[in-house]
Amino acid sequence: MSKAKSTTSGSTYTIVTPMRTNGAMRVRESATGETYEVVDYVDELLRERIAALAEGSTVRLELTPIADCTNVCRATQLRPGGLPEPGL
């Protein structure tokens, strides 16, 4: 039986390591403290929006594990309330 998690449903994550030049970034799930390496994005627009986030920012994302890896993921959706309002 695989231990790989299914797609998350829009959990809140903190940016631990902002997106690097290779497109990978590390996030920590707020509820569990688990960390994930995000290495792929459903499209370029999502990648660009997430790339703009600084270390310590919080964001609501939907992540899907890649293959049998439980902590290497693809970002499939940015959920409402994920990006901070300008000026806050």
Image (cartoon, rainbow, N blue to C red):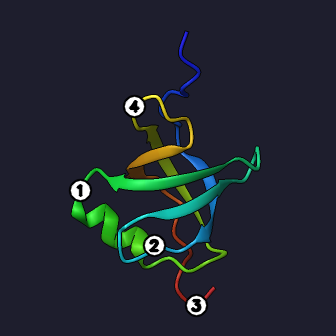
Mark 3 element type: loop
Tell me, for residue 87, which label it has, or none.
3
Along the line of sight, the residue nearer the viewer: 49 or 68: 68
Q: Which residue is mark 4?
A: 67
Residue mark closest to the camera, 2 vs 3: 2
Mark 1 — residue? 43
Q: Nearer the viewer, mark 2 or mark 1?
A: 2
Amino acid type at circle 2 is: Met
Residue matched to label 2: 19
- What's the distance in space between the residues labelled 2 and 3, CA to CA? 22 Å
Gap in angstroms between the C-alphas marked 1 and 3: 27 Å
| Of the image marks 1 and 3, the number of the one nearer the N terminus | 1
Place of residue 81 in the rendered image (x, y in percent of width and height, measured from the top left): 54, 61
Which residue of the protein is positioned furthest toward the right in this rendering?
Answer: 32
* Mark earlier in primary sequence (2, 3): 2
Location of the N terminus by quadrant is top right
Judged by depth in the image, the label closer to the viewer, 4 or 3, is 4
Mark nearest the camera among 2 and 4 is 4
- Look at the numbered disc 2 and give the secondary structure of its residue: loop
Q: Position of residue 33 (x, y in %)?
A: 76, 50
